Amino acid sequence: MMLLFRCAAAAAGVALSWAAYAQSFPTKPIRIIIPFVAGGSSDIVGRAIGSKFQELLGQPAIVENKPGANGAIAAEFVAKAEPDGYTLLVGSIGVFSINSALFKDLRYHPVRDFAPITLAVTTPNVLITKPDLAAHSMRELVELAKNNPGRLSYCSSGTGSSDHLTAELLKQMSGTFAVHVPYRGGAACQTDIMGNQVDYSFQNLGAVTNYIKAGRMKALAVTAATRHPQLPNVPSVVEAGFPDLVVTSWQAAAAPAKTSREVVARLHDARSRALDARSAKGRHPAGVMETLFKTAPLTRAMEAIVAAAGSEAGEARQVAENLVTANLLGHDSHGIGMIPRYIDAVLEGGLAPNQHPKITVDAGALIAVDGCKGYGQVIGREAMLMAIERAKRLGSCVMALGNSHHLGRIGQWAEMAVAEGLVSMHFVNVISHARVAPHGGRDARFGTNPCCIGIPLPGEAPFVLDYATSAVAQGKMRVAHNKGEKMPAGRLIDTEGNPTNDPRYAVIPPFGAMLAFGEHKGYGMAVACELLGGALTGGGTWHYEESTKQRVMNGMLVVVIDPQKLGTAAAFEREARLFLDWLRKSRPAPGFDRVRIAGEPEREMRAKRSRDGIPVDDTTWEEIQRAADKVKLARERVQAIAKGP
């Protein structure tokens, strides 16, 4: 027993010593080892991180390039370094993943030999060519290679690198042959492309965007499913006819395997503050790194803007939390990008701060509620509390809510009900700008009219189906437009009613229109939401010409049911469990790892963004800062709050 106490005391002492060590860490410069030559993507990312260490950790970073063997030399060096946090590796997908699959005699193990600090950046590759190559498209390059077998050459940052394997995949798909010229990093490859020494290559987008824009090399395609906002005129490989060539590369930072968790956590925090909250923005060519914000500071920044527009503290907090939660769940269309529109609506008088819902008809299990033009984040919550209380007391409640400003993500109101063991259904109309065309029509006649159903499930998280009746939410069009992305076919028509993939037709005049999902069936659901959420609630329907006002009004018909009061609770739990078990036994289709139900993708996204941060594009952030200007809140103040301590 005494030995056991001594062992426990020793373990506690070690833990305390590591904690003390981490608190004082670092006391000397930190070495960041880059496995490739200067100028490549790993080098750019490593230097962007290291440039802030003096400010954030009190010690400078020394960046050292150790190229060779597709990064294996540098990786082995760091793997065998002292695990004290003073020697770090910033490397690519090749170093941390591909090498172990290609090289049998690798003298490091990418999992066992490293303590991961962070995934720093993800990016597609770009198919680039020398300036005077005859091919001007991906198809033309393939034809050129077919007509000249073995006469074209392509370079890479090293054998087994992401860009090498992408080129090999293209050769395999197209049945062509070209000569591989490996380098000890991407920078040398890029130099020879610009010097017309090599014909083509696949290089990380962030490393070559400035060269492309300067006309020093040609870009034929981006290895992504859609166009990239930094190169909006360059087609994706999907558009180019090679949908199976979607490739994402990444850069990550790691320490030797036995580095203490406390030190790794401190380094991770420094990395987050260096790259998140925009502190490294602009250091990466083309700004390919997402601007990431941590949840709490971003919420406080949005809260400050809403408060500056006249909201009381509690209301400002509720609005901000609701919007940031939408971003966390991946619903960026209903996230903080709505702030500019809210501020305009307040200033125009279409949105009234500090309002609360008022019951206008009370028939027990049937109530009508006036939202008083208040913030939907507050009106929706307080109205749902009324409906939930009555459903639990009476067995059900039908609530007609009208005249509320934008209710945000409708799934939040269903989540309130299912948290109490209740089923809820929501039919919502939108009075803002007509953006959706009726089936068979060529111009917009109504809004995106969402529908939501929430169902509590036995022994697991709830089923929450939340969707717009348009083929895509209007906010997602705004996000795509801000990022310079194109939309998939079947979502949009232009001003003449012709199909288009340009989201500008849903965002800026002259407007076209979005289409309803599911052709006539989705269109029918949209009409039902207009009639139930707009006409039946008394909040009003869309039946007038386009308005320039920025307010977004919602009506919502809500049906809440208590399964316990219905008398079928036991059968409901049993049958729901049997059905879901049966459903999930379905074999996954190609491209899927398993069958999911509504609500699961959002929960997975929330876990990811809670860990990694919330991405915000440049255009959206600029619009938010302009909104702050309008309510006399300094941009510097917003930026400082969002960055966090």
Image: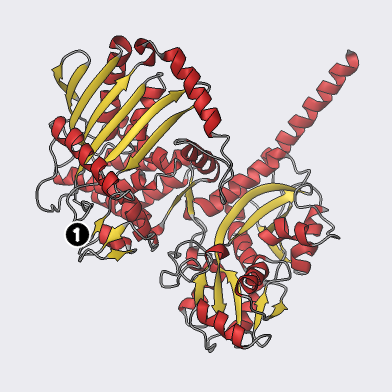
Judging depth in this view, the residue of 114 and 449 nearest the camera is: 449
Q: What residue does disc 1 label?
A: 442
- The image quadrant of residue 431 is top left
x, y percent for residue 356: 21, 26
Give the answer, above or below, for where 494 lies relative to 335.
below
x, y percent for residue 444: 19, 54
Residue at 40%, 50% in the rendered image:
639
All told, the count of numbered labels is: 1
Disc 1 packing (10 Å; few <14; some 14–19; many ≥20): some
User: Label 1 amino acid?
Assistant: Arg
Task: Work out which quarter of the rendered image holds the N terminus and state it.
Answer: top right
Give the answer, above or below, for where 263 lies relative to 385.
below
Looking at the image, what colour scheme do you see?
secondary structure
Give the answer, above or below, for where 38 lies relative to 276.
below
Give the answer, above or below, for where 579 lies relative to 407.
above
- The image quadrant of residue 127 is bottom right
Residue at 74%, 70% in the rendered image:
159
Residue 615 visible: yes
Residue at 25%, 46% in the rendered image:
523
Judging depth in this view, the residue of 191 and 297 nearest the camera is: 191
Q: Is residue 72 left or right of residue 177?
A: right
Q: Is residue 572 left or right of residue 242?
A: left
Residue furthest out toward the left: 544
Q: Is residue 289 left or right of residue 232?
A: right
- The image quadrant of residue 522 is top left
x, y percent for residue 319: 32, 36
Judged from the image, the secondary structure of the residue bearing numbered disc 1 is: loop
x, y percent for residue 254: 70, 51
Residue 30 visible: no
